[in-house]
């Protein structure tokens, strides 16, 4: 029952906002954020419900049709985990947009597309039907194409065209895989497909899996397929960059890859190791390309590639510890990468440039932004008390546990390079030493009229920064048990999903 | 071999579209290649649902139909056509905007973003 | 040649006047009989919007834009989407999302097959006005570009 609201509410908000948001300017600000808040509460409610539920799964049959024939919505621990991430980040990004999007015309259009993207992501997460997943994936993708082009300047349009072409190639591959899988299994229900696919060692199943991996691999920007990301993510408005980097590549890419590889096609571990090799390549390539960037958002986008590599490394090891590390890093990365993109938006809001060399005196004029940027940078670089450290530590242990010492060394090396890159950001972007004398500098500031960003932007940045510190507690067993251990169990025992859905 | 000829032709069409997207330099040729790719997939899906000497899956008065083609691909293809249409419209809109800013449709001249 | 926006010749305009209503009627037929024969909301919506496009081509864009500008078309499109969602939510009130709350009815009559008919109508509004607003936006955009060119 409560499951359906994750699709209904964002769609409803998008449509209603498209009617009334045109007419009243304040309507979309208030209405959309209320809807996002309700979704945030609902995702905690569903976390509580699934923990008290006997079977730890909800299967909702749309229209009352039985499972192989109708469309079903399936919520297990993995889905709830992703729902929590998506709705928490969306809530804070939505609040941030109130002030940030003030300078754009047609704010209602932004909010409607935003909610459509949210509906698509929620739909992908809770759907238990192959074609339904495809439809929601397209809804989220089309909304994101339009949002990347939202500024309609030269750069945005060019990036949007690259993104839309690559995105449509990836969805074409996914559609081809869906066609082959339907032709082979004659069913669209995920659990039912898994029933047929596990018995056979047929080559069609392998081709299908390969095509799915290409499609979702483009969406998640894993290394040989990564080159659209550094253009597309920085060109969007800052809240959307946060959504794209923090959530979209994870729900449309990583979530679906893990679901398909572990729960549906039940691949053996040898093939899975390919994922960890790809992860290693992503980590190295991303961080090296990030090192010499001067565009703040572009630097963050390259770090997204590198951090996604960490997640794939953890998942590809396919041990319980590796999966735990990968999923924990997924959670952490969506928090601190959204936070960092929001701080980049705050800098862009005041200086209207993204180049790190053009920022002056930020730490004195914008102390709260600086505070959250420092926490975000330390988290992504893996400085001990923050959340990024714990997940990287778990991945490192998982590497050592599965006797891949070289992987472990790469994890440490990439972490050090990340730290170097973010020290550069902090030094040039935030704690820049002034070349002028003190008096001239004040004049400069007065002329540019730099002051701290509006309240709503501060609120979401500081909240995410605090979340970065709090998330370190997931390492404690009780919290881990509620949030993440059962997710790992569902993924690690591939059969469990099918057996729970089809009883 | 002859049995699968239709499928092979569909896949050929798909790769023609993919080739066009990768090689062509004009924005609108890329868009048209995308349309070719989309339609090849739709055709392939429809053909998968075909059964030998079967009729359409619609109930009619006074006629008993026993052998009908698979209706599921037809419903799904309709959805995927709609999706393809909306992506195409978005692509055309962005291409027109690009023409307004850059005064060209040639992608080799549209390269502001590098690095 | 006259101004491009004032439409085509008298012959075209006259023929359009005669055929447009037929085209629109055919679109409605396809929509309303979607649950009995081939067709449905999407095909019907496309045919209905073709009649609008027919008018735009024959009489010029100004004739239509005066009555339906892209804002109104957008709002109507959204209404269609909202209508479809409402049908689904009404099912939720009777128990299940997308539940068929109307009943099967008598076979081969128009009011049968439950929520398929209202859903088809909602889809027709959504698709028809969606296509219309996309078409209008592209037309307005290109004419705006031409004006800019003239100024230069």
Image (tube, coloured by chain):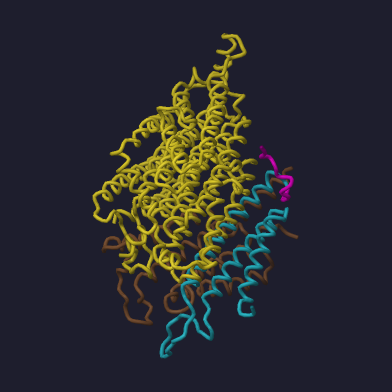
Q: With respect to residue C75, does C56 lie above or below?
A: below
Relative to A94, say whether A136 is above or below.
below
Residue A328 occupies which quadrant of the picture? top left
Residue A220 percent across, percent down from the top left: 53, 48
Q: How many marks?
A: 0
Whether residue A179 is visible: no
Nearest the camera: B103 or A343? A343
Residue A455, image quadrant: top left
Viewer-side residue, A350 vs A369: A369
Tell me residue A37's x, y (percent): 34, 42
- Chain ID, cyan in image: B
Q: Is residue A445 left or right of residue C10?
A: left
B106 falls in the magenta region: yes
Q: Main structural element of the magenta stretch: helix, strand or loop? A: loop
- Quarter the N terminus of chain C occupies: bottom right
Q: Residue at x 28, y 51 (%)?
A: A50
Q: Does residue C133 lie above or below B60 as drawn?
A: above
Coordinates of residue A158 in the picture (x, y in percent): 64, 45
**Magenta stretch containing residue A2, yes or no?**
no
Q: Is residue A156 visible?
A: yes
Q: Nearer the viewer, residue B5 or C90?
A: B5
Kindly identify the residue that appears in the image at 30 percent across and 55 percent down.
A57
Residues in magenta, as a range: B104-115
Q: Which chain is brown?
A: C
> Is B16 situated left or right of A250 in this image?
right
Q: Residue at x 62, y 62 (%)?
A: B35
At 50% across and 60% down in the image, what residue appears? Answer: C129
User: Which chain is the one coloured yellow?
Assistant: A
Name the outermost residue toward the right.
C1
Q: Position of residue A44 (x, y in %)?
A: 30, 44
């Amino acid at each position: 029952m409560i499951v359906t609201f994750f699709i209904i509410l964002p769609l409803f908000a998008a449509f209603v906002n498209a009617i009334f948001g045109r007419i009243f300017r304040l309507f979309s600000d208030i209405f959309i954020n209320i809807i996002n808040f309700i979704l945030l509460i609902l995702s905690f409610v569903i976390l509580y419900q699934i923990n008290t539920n006997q079977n730890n799964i909800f299967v909702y049959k749309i229209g009352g049709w039985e499972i192989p024939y109708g469309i079903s919505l399936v919520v297990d621990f993995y889905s709830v985990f992703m729902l929590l991430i998506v709705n928490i980040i969306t809530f804070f990004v939505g609040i941030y947009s109130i002030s940030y999007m003030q300078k754009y015309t047609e704010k209602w259009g932004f909010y409607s597309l935003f909610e459509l993207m949210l509906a698509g992501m929620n739909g992908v997460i809770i759907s238990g039907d192959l074609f339904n997943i495809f439809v929601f994936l397209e809804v989220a993708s089309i909304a994101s194409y339009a949002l990347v082009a939202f500024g309609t300047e030269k750069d945005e349009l060019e990036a949007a065209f690259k993104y839309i072409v690559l995105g449509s190639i990836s969805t074409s591959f996914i559609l081809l895989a869906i066609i082959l899988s339907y032709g082979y299994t004659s069913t669209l229900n995920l659990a039912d497909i898994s029933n047929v696919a596990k018995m056979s060692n047929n080559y069609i199943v392998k081709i299908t899996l390969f095509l799915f991996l290409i499609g979702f691999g483009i969406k998640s920007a894993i290394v040989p397929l990564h080159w659209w990301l550094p253009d597309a993510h920085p060109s969007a408005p800052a809240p959307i960059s946060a959504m794209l980097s923090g959530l979209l590549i994870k729900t449309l890419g990583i979530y679906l890859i893990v679901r398909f590889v572990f729960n549906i096609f039940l691949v053996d571990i040898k093939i899975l190791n390919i994922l960890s090799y790809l992860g290693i390549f992503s980590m190295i390539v991303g961080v090296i390309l990030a090192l010499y960037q001067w565009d703040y958002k572009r630097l963050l986008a390259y770090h997204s590639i590198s951090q996604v590599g960490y997640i794939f490394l953890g998942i590809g090891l396919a041990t319980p510890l590796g999966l735990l590390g990968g999923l924990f890093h997924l959670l952490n990365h969506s928090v601190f990468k959204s936070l960092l993109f929001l701080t980049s938006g705050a800098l862009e809001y005041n200086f209207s440039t993204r180049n790190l060399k053009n920022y002056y005196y930020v730490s004195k004029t914008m102390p709260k932004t600086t505070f959250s940027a420092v926490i975000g940078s330390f988290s992504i670089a893996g400085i001990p008390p923050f959340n990024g450290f714990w997940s990287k530590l778990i991945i490192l242990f998982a590497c050592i546990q599965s006797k891949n010492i070289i992987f472990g060394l790469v994890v440490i090396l990439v972490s050090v390079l990340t730290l170097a890159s973010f020290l550069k950001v902090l030094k040039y972007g935030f704690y820049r030493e002034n070349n002028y004398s003190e008096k001239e500098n004040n004049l400069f500031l007065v002329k540019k009229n730099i002051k701290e960003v509006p309240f709503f932007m501060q609120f979401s940045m500081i909240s995410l920064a605090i979340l970065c510190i709090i998330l370190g507690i997931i390492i404690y067993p009780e919290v881990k048990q509620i949030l993440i251990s059962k997710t790992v169990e569902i993924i690690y025992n591939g059969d469990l999903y099918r057996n729970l859905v089809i009883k | 071999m002859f049995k699968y000829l239709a499928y092979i032709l569909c896949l050929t069409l798909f790769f023609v579209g993919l080739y066009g997207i990768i090689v062509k330099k004009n924005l609108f040729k890329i868009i048209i290649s995308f349309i070719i790719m989309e339609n090849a997939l739709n055709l392939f899906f429809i053909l998968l649902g075909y059964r030998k000497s079967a009729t359409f899956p619609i109930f009619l008065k006074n006629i008993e139909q026993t052998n009908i083609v698979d209706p599921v691909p037809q419903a799904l293809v309709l959805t995927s056509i709609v999706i393809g249409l909306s992506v195409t419209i978005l692509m055309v809109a962005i291409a027109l905007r690009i023409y307004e800013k850059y005064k060209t449709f040639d992608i080799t001249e549209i390269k502001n973003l590098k690095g | 040649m006259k101004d491009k926006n004032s439409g085509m010749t008298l012959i075209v305009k006259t023929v359009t006047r005669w055929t447009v209503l037929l085209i629109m009627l055919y679109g409605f037929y396809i929509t309303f009989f979607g649950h009995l024969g081939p067709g449905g909301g999407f095909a019907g919506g496309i045919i209905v919007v073709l009649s609008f496009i027919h008018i735009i081509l024959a009489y010029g864009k100004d004739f239509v834009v005066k009555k339906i500008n892209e804002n109104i078309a957008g709002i109507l499109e959204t209404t269609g989407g909202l209508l479809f969602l409402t049908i689904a939510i009404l099912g939720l009130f009777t128990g299940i999302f997308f539940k068929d709350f109307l009943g099967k009815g008598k076979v081969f009559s128009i009011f049968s097959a439950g929520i398929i008919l209202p859903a088809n109508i909602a889809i027709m509004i959504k698709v028809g006005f969606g296509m219309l607003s996309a078409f209008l936006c592209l037309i307005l955009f290109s004419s705006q570009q031409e004006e800019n060119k003239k100024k230069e």
